[in-house]
Image (cartoon, rainbow, N blue to C red):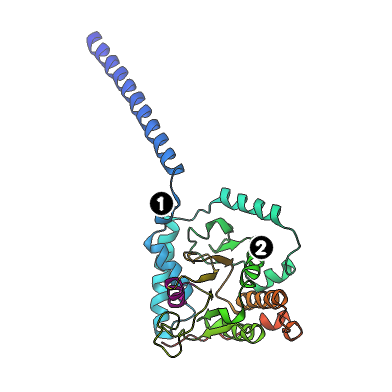
């Protein structure tokens, strides 16, 4: 029995040493993985945005523009994708957001373009469930229902930057593309006030790239309302190497944009407010005699019937 007990003790000692060695190896591996994660390039981080999340991001832009028959199927797919997206990624990069917020506060030289209450009333700060890597730095939290929320200070700063940017171009050098129906009325008013050409409902294919078309035109800047819906105009603009100002919701990629406006690009109130601020700022900067003709803010943010587009 003494010999058996001695053997048991040696076996237990051996097992304890083996466990210690395994723990050391695990710690080393975890340490290496942490280093690898911290050294990820922007490209590697972008690849983390899965195909499921990308499908969800596109569906969230298309959902107000689809026909009734398609909507039921899309909703079912959307629910499934939402569940997958939740499992894959739900964390916002807090350090980057905090850093950007501090930078905005430091750079802020004047008060907001409009009172904070007006931004809140328009819902411009309410994003979608899908958050692309490009938009993560501008999001500071999620609501209980999973919707991402933009920082209103950053929204204000981005609109100021956009006004300064478009004011460098003459009206005839700019086009605005807005396929989303909820933005049509505000886009048309924007065009009347600024003289900037607007394409709603449908963007004529090749108008910027095909010189043989009788409607061919050259522009220097394209304002894109939603990169998912207005992708043809975006691609054409990039093909001819012209500038792009893009309105980006949380589910948009900013690839190809020279400047971005962040905010809800789905609702009539939010788009109306964006076009109002751009029109007011552009007319003032360019000395266009239209300030007195600009409707008040309530007109731009009125509710509109969202009728799906039939393709």
Q: Which residues are magenta?
A: 227-239
Q: Earlier in the sequence, mark 2 or mark 1?
A: 1
**Residue 229, position in %: x, y?**
46, 76
Q: Find disc 1 in the rendering and name its residue.
A: 44
User: In the displayed structure, does residue 28 sit left or right of residue 148?
Assistant: left
**Residue 182, position in %: x, y?**
56, 82
- Quadrant showing the N terminus: top left
Q: Find disc 2 in the rendering and name its residue.
A: 157
The CA span between labels 2 and 1 is 28 Å
User: In the displayed structure, does residue 48 sit left or right of residue 108?
Assistant: left
Residue 243 visible, this orientation:
yes
Circle 1 residues within 10 Å: few <14, some 14–19, many ≥20: few
User: Which secondary structure dominates the residues rendered in magenta?
Assistant: helix
User: In the displayed structure, does residue 200 sit left or right of residue 192?
Assistant: left
Q: Residue furthest bottom?
A: 214
Q: Residue at x 73, y 84 (%)?
A: 289
> In terms of image quadrants, where is residue 115?
bottom right
Q: Residue at x 31, y 23 (%)?
A: 18
In the image, residue 2 above or below residue 208: above
């Amino acid at each position: 029995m003494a010999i058996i007990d001695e053997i048991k003790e040696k076996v237990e000692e051996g097992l304890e040493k083996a466990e210690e060695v395994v723990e050391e190896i695990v710690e080393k591996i975890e340490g290496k993985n942490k280093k690898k994660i911290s050294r990820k390039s922007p490209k590697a981080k972008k690849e983390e945005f899965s195909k499921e999340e990308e499908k969800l991001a596109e569906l969230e832009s298309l959902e107000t523009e689809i026909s009734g028959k398609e909507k039921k199927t899309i909703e079912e797919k959307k629910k499934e994708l939402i569940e997958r997206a939740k499992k894959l990624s739900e964390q916002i990069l807090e350090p980057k957001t905090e850093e950007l917020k501090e930078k905005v506060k430091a750079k802020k030289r004047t008060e907001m373009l409009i009172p904070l209450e007006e931004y809140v009333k328009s819902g411009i700060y309410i994003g979608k469930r899908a958050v692309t890597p490009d938009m993560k730095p501008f999001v500071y939290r999620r609501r209980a229902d999973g919707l991402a929320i933009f920082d209103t200070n950053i929204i204000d700063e981005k609109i100021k930057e956009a006004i300064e940017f478009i004011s460098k171009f003459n009206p005839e050098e700019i086009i605005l593309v807005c396929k989303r129906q909820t933005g049509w009325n505000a886009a048309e008013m924007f065009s009347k006030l600024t003289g900037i050409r607007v394409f709603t409902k449908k963007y004529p294919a090749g108008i910027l790239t095909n010189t043989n078309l009788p409607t061919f035109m050259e522009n220097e800047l394209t304002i894109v309302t939603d990169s998912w819906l207005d992708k043809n105009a975006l691609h054409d603009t990039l093909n001819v190497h012209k500038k792009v100002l893009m309105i980006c919701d949380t589910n948009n990629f900013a690839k190809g944009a020279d400047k971005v406006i962040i905010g809800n690009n789905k609702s009539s109130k939010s788009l109306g407010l964006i076009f109002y601020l751009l029109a007011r700022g552009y007319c003032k900067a360019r000395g266009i005699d239209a300030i007195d003709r600009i409707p008040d803010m309530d007109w731009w943010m009125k509710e509109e019937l969202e009728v799906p587009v039939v393709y």
